[in-house]
Image (cartoon, rainbow, N blue to C red):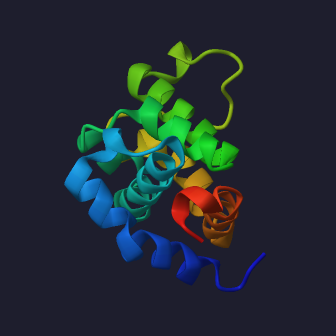
Amino acid sequence: MHTDDFDFVQSIYNGGLAQKAGELGVAALSTPERSVVLALWAKGILDNGGFAYLHEAGADIRVIRDAFAEVGLDEASRACDLSVIALEAPRREQLPANVTRIDRIDDGEERWSECDKMIWRLGDRFDSAVASYIRRNKAIFGV
């Protein structure tokens, strides 16, 4: 792990990627650029309010899931899938038998508690994964 992964990722994002996304729109970005922008945007929301906020923001969770998978954050991608299951299955007894990681399914934010924990447990691994992805696509990011 690079100790400066957070600073590296922020330098790419603040060094022109955010502005490009703002001017052209996320849909106009290349897949690597779009994946980084969406992963960073979603992680910011998830860190502040969890999946409840992300769902309330009207985000297409499947697009966010794909962005996380693209940058190598499979656990975050899986958390997105579980959050959709939690949203669509308001009662524990309605969950598929193979879904065991969700602690509680009820009204309110608790329905996503385990999904949130999956994201929060990433810690520095989030920045490391995004930094590695940027380095693997250095021609696109100009590094």
Q: In which quadrant of the rendered image does the C terminus lie? A: bottom right
Q: Is residue 2 left or right of residue 19?
A: right
The tally of labels here is: 0
Q: Is residue 138 visible?
A: yes
Residue at point 68% right, 49% down?
Answer: 72
Measured as percent of width and height from the top left, residue 101 is found at 66, 37
Measured as percent of width and height from the top left, residue 89 is found at 44, 20
Q: Nearer the viewer, residue 60 or 108?
A: 60
Q: In the displayed structure, would residue 75 be above or below residue 119?
A: above
Q: Is residue 108 visible?
A: no
Q: In the displayed structure, would residue 89 be above or below residue 59?
A: above
Q: Is residue 42 left or right of residue 121?
A: left
Residue that extends furthest to the left in the rendered view of this protein = 23
Q: Nearer the viewer, residue 58 or 31?
A: 31
Residue that extends furthest to the right in the rendered view of this protein = 1
Q: In which quadrant of the rendered image does the N terminus lie? A: bottom right
Measured as percent of width and height from the top left, residue 111 is found at 44, 38
Q: Is residue 133 left or right of residue 117?
A: right
Residue at point 23% right, 57% down?
Answer: 22
Measured as percent of width and height from the top left, residue 69 is found at 62, 41
Residue at point 31% right, 59% down?
Answer: 20
